[in-house]
Image (spheres, coloured by chain):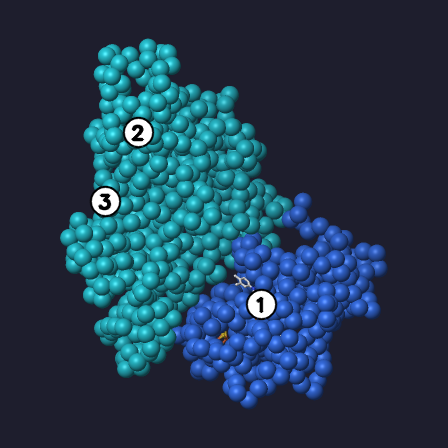
Amino acid sequence: MNPFAYVQPRTFDEAAAALAEKRFSLPMLKAGGMDVVDHLKEGLIQPDALVNIKRLRSQPDGAPIAEAGGKVRIEATATMAEIAASDVVKRLAPVLGLSVGTAASPQVRNIGTAAGNLLQRPRCWYYRHEQFDCLKKGGSTCYSIEGENKFHAIFGGGPCHIVHPSNLAPALMVCNGVVHIVGSDRKSLPIAQLFHGPDQGIRSEHVLKPGEVITHITCDAAPRSGFYAIKEKQSFDWPLVAASVSLELDGAKIRSARVCAGAVAPIPWDLPKVEEALKGVSVDDDAALRRACDVAGDGAKPMTDNAYKVRLLPVAVRRATLIAAGRKTEVDA
Amino acid sequence: MKPLDEATLIPSHMPTTNRPSNMGASVNDNASRLDAVPKVTGSAKYGKDYHLPNSLYIVFIRCPWGAADFVSADEAAAKATPGVVEMQVRGKSCTYHGQSIGYIAADSPRAAKRALRALAPKWKRTPVKTQISDTVKDNPDIGDDGQNNMNGAEVTHEAVYTTPVQTHSSLETHGGAVDHRGDRATVYASTQGTSSSRDGLGGPLGLGQGDFELVCEYVGGGFGSKLGGPGKELTTAAQLAAKYKRPAYMFCNRSEEHLDTGNRPSSRTLARIGFKKDGSPVGGEIRTWGGTGVAGGGGGASIPSGRYKLGEIKKLHDDVSFNGGGPRAFRAPGHPQAAFAEELMLDEVAAKLGMDPLALRMKLAGGEHRKMFEAGAKLIGWSNRKPNGSQNSALRTGYGAGAAGWGSAGPGGAAEVVIARDGSVESRTGTQDIGTGQRTGMGIVTADALGIPLKYVSVKIGRSTLPPGPGSGGSVTTPTTAPTMTAVAKAAKTQLLELLATQANAKPDEFSIKDGVVLRNGEKYLTWEEACGKLPNDGITANKGKGERGDGHSNGVQFVKLDVDTETGVIHLRHVVAIQSCGRVICRKTAESQIIGGVIQGLSFALFENKLLDRNTGAMVNDNFESYKILGPGDMPHIEPVLWSKGQSGFKALGEPPTIPTAGATACALFNAIGRPVRDLPLTPDKVLAALAAGQGGAA
Ligand SMILES: Cc1cc2nc3c(=O)[nH]c(=O)nc-3n(C[C@H](O)[C@H](O)[C@H](O)COP(=O)(O)OP(=O)(O)OC[C@H]3O[C@@H](n4cnc5c(N)ncnc54)[C@H](O)[C@@H]3O)c2cc1C
Ligand code: SF4
């Protein structure tokens, strides 16, 4: 680990100013620091300054999560545990709490922040190992294509095949999330525009410019929303696939649906075909619901070892839909 | 000792910790670990905790690829890094990820790591093999012997079973800290062999055996990987400490631990076996291959295990090399992988015979295993088991069973018991507690032999200057030391009683000790403290005594109940019953804890563990605890250990057998639930889904 300056700003504006300081050539924000420190330890980054925003709030004495004009307002530094426990979230946008509430481990959830979760880097094991000079690190190959790709992308891959690691991002997608920014001209950005696929640049996964700092996140109320992740291990593991769903219901009938998948593509992966198919379906009509969800895997391009994900995705979508509608899934008897 | 009979079988819904003590079968039913508080509060110092002032810190320079030729390194830059004291680079070709080509020693861990980065070795990758199937692609034809063995078979079965490389994953990594003071040294090790580690250190330290002490009071797990000599980590630390006459520290990090400290080799088993229609065994051929990485041997698999009559079996074995670190002994070496194949094979044969797999086992297993199977079947609720593949619901329940057996060592090792005038007792033997409860066990047998409460006894283990004890391998530590310690404690007691008799002008056999009270002719005579107060200044030291072997052995059976989510392929473990004999139980809690730990390790092997080498470069891609997956709290079933005390008197093995049958029983339970076998560990959702899909396709 190389030496670096450690900067402790008092406000987000000060944080943005620190990032802009001339004396630093590679300054970096650190929130909870889970992912930043992992990168330092593996020798993947060599920042010359860390700007610690862990305890900053965009509103003085602001609560980590608040209701603001019918919308949900989440501080960038709200922890995953705080989001999962929030009554505002449970009432207005349960999908957010469900998405982060079972991710990783209690220790990670107590430290990891909302913005840090959105902007964490991919888990591709070739990316995470210093010796692999893969495309994402400026090299010339993607090792996953002919290598160990069991956990890689089935949609939107190429030339890099990572899956976006954030549980929170797809959940925010179905609630029309917006990230609010300081440090540049733009003041906000819809979550749907925050991420870009490898075809728009392999070295990064999002469009924020150096110097931009997320202060808070807002999203629409989505009281009928749910999340379901399929994991190998039931604690301390990443989803094989995950689905976030938000519904508008007429009784049991789906008027409209927003569906976004996680862990299947380099970005949170919208499933418009499923949304269309779900329209008019009763959540209590098992056969119709299955039919609608089965299109989730359409268009998937699995790699050598991850075709099983194509089978899993409709299951995750259907279970998330049932949870969104307040129903039980077939496995919680 | 009350036998375990039906009336006293423990209800399965009762959590382990709330169950009544095991029917008085143990020497001490209620004692907690003597070192529980230091371990929980952190005051227990493991070898890895010894950061000594002015210490050198050593890192190994390792090959990052499965196979590569060393090209160059910036030695000048590395040497110029502030704090670097010494560096050795032996550029060469490497054949596995993690192989070391030298080391850097520096004044701090940070300096050593910076120098390693500055060194930036360059490598040229060469082609790799990463698994057995890179070499063994097809099934060889059956040999004449095997063919003859199958003559007369009415039902035959042929299948290949495979298991991956499992790493020991000890929480405390390999290494040591050495405090060299010129003409004396203290070595803080993490070892399963206090004596054998010491034996290898005189040379590197440049000292005679009497001039240094090896200290290993606590060990954060070893599972076989810390047996034998000091290992290259500690040896290097000793050499550099001797050279610079200052402390030196070398412990692996988590990645290095996965890469280069041994493993359970992978396995491939090709079984061809025949039975009569009524389930009587005919025989056949079983070929095994062991995936030993770069090592030439050590991949044997214990199948047939001998626990089941399988008729005449021709057994063939080959070890297969590839570009991975070599194996080391791992809790019941060769057994869990073999039991996986054997148990699942039996369930598949039972399905072909149309028999209940437990009924088949009752036909093939020996007497005690049969009794254990009967008892376990009740505890797990085997009568609720549905025929293979007969369920249609999304969540399907499965039951599986398996058996374990283990031989036992006889008494041995040296021990010493010291009774002081204040009534305190020291129980000394140079073994180590690798987490099994050895320290507690020594205290309990000493207190029991003396007839006093445990609180009087303080146990001294984990030092090379103590009377030598065995290494902790082969489950021998307790069977070796407990009888010896018992005999020595009895000798100390005899000395004490003889002294009291002389002082009272009476005969020694008038005296006895019970519950900390000295009795004369059955009447209270003195308290323990009062009696000890009558000792001469130096108290009593006893170190002679021959332990008794006693009757007993280590058999076990396990039952696994699980649910399979057939839409996701995810397995939810529900309940494990683990019946195990181990001779006379010394300490119920630590004995149960051994069983529970063995089961957890077995379940983890069944569901998750897999040292995954990138097929193109041979680099281990999951050399951490994030993607090298280990059973976590969310996956844990209710585990019910049952100590089987029928006919047991001597102290017998317990460390290894409880991890033998678990993965096999789990695979059988999965087969029962979904009606299709998954013959390749770990049993991950992708494979479960593939098996289900094959079933839908109507394949055989
Ligand atoms: C074993 C394990 C399992 C895990 N499983 C999951 C899982 O299942 N699902 C999941 O979603 N996550 C999972 N995680 C990841 C974890 O949730 C993230 O690492 C964590 O949320 C990151 O948050 P942080 O605050 O620590 O981020 P940091 O490490 O502090 O920052 C991460 C990145 O975000 C940038 N950043 C942080 N805050 C801001 C801001 N306000 N504005 C601009 N940039 C910012 C940083 O510069 C950095 O690039 C897992 C982690 C581990 C170790
Ligand atoms: S998937 Fe992306 S991060 Fe992984 S090896 Fe390929 S290019 Fe690198």
Number of other residues with Cα within 10 Å of mark 3, as a class: few under 14, some 14 to 19, many 20 or more: some
Mark 3 vs mark 1, foreground winner is 3
Circle on res. B465: 3
* Pointers 2 and 3 within a single chain: yes
Q: Is residue A32 left or right of residue A150?
A: right
State how many labels appear. 3
Residue A267, position in %: x, y? 61, 73
Distance in Å between CA atoms under marks 2 and 3: 23 Å
Mark 2 vs mark 1, foreground winner is 2
Q: Amino acid at mark 1?
A: Gly
What chain does mark 3 sit on? Answer: B
The quarter of the picture where residue B654 lies is: top left
- What shade does chain A have? blue
- Label 2, secondary structure: give it: loop
Tell me which numbered mark, 2 or 3, is placed earlier along the sequence.
Answer: 2
Q: Is residue B296 left or right of residue B526?
A: left
Q: Amino acid at mark 3?
A: Thr
Q: Amino acid at mark 2?
A: Arg
* Pointers 2 and 1 within a single chain: no
Front in this rendered view, residue A103 or A201: A103
Distance in Å between CA atoms under marks 3 and 1: 48 Å
Whether the residue carrying mark 2 lies under 8 Å from ligand 1 is answered with no
Residue hosting label 2 = B421
Residue hosting label 1 = A32
Mark 2 vs mark 3, foreground winner is 2
Whether A122 is drawn above or below A141: the answer is above
- What shade does chain B have? cyan
